[in-house]
Image (tube, helix red, strand yellow):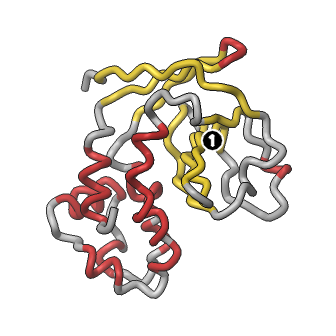
Amino acid sequence: MNTVKECAELYNALLNKEYLFRLENNIQFSIFFSASNFYHLLGLEKLSDIAQLKGKKSNQIYKHILNNRIQDNIIKKSNYYYLIESRIKNFEIIPDLLNFDKSNKIIVDFDLDKLNFKSKLQFTKYILFKRNNSDYIHLTIGLKDKLYPETFIVENGSTYISNQTMLDILGIEVTERRR
């Protein structure tokens, strides 16, 4: 991916679908993506110096990106763009994480205390991850009232997965969600 708009268009294909994960140890859970998740998955909250992102709801920002009201040239002007650039470049891997592939792995009952740094992943329950060359691509799944796609992390290293409990994914079933 090269642009925020391409990321938004790819994300649009994930909407209105439910993803049911079957793991070893008889664990099952499902998630679905909403327009409001896009903002945080891409890390747009980090771009605090972009006026077009301030004061708008996350689902509005997603729609503005799709409708070209917020364009890539605006996003790239941010002094903090470097913080999200790897997310934009690797965003196309999210659908790969959601397709059944024995090389994809999942961390269950993510333990924040096993990280050697302070993290904001306080609601993370699961982390889907895949290795892409030297990078690890992570989709975290948080739990508040329900499970939801929490954030997307691209890391050159295995910090988030080291010493965590990992299970194999036995299957992923994708179904259309009724509105």
In the rendered image, residue 77, in percent from the top left (x then y), is placed at: 35, 86
Name the image quarter holding the N terminus. bottom left
Left or right, residue 103 beside residue 149: right
Q: Looking at the picture, does residue 45 appear above or below residue 50? A: above
Give the residue drawn at x 70%, y 27%.
167
Left or right, residue 96 beside residue 168: left
Q: Amino acid at mark 1?
A: Ile
Q: Looking at the picture, does residue 108 appear above or below residue 55? A: above
Left or right, residue 94 beside residue 146: left
Give the residue drawn at x 66%, y 37%.
125
Of 40 and 153, the residue lying toward us: 153
In the rendered image, residue 36, in percent from the top left (x then y), is placed at: 37, 50
Image quarter of residue 153? bottom right
Of 93 and 179, the residue lying toward us: 93
Q: Looking at the picture, does residue 62 appear above or below residue 17? A: below
Residue with the mark numbered 1: 127
Tag 1's secondary structure?
A: strand
Name the image quarter holding the C terminus. top left
Q: Looking at the picture, does residue 135 appear above or below residue 163? A: below
> How many neighbours does mark 1 have within 10 angstroms: few (below 14), some (14-19), or many (20 or more)?
many
In the rendered image, residue 127, in percent from the top left (x then y), is placed at: 63, 41
Query: Which residue appears farthest toward the front when viewing the image?
Result: 133
In the rendered image, residue 91, in percent from the top left (x then y), is placed at: 41, 55
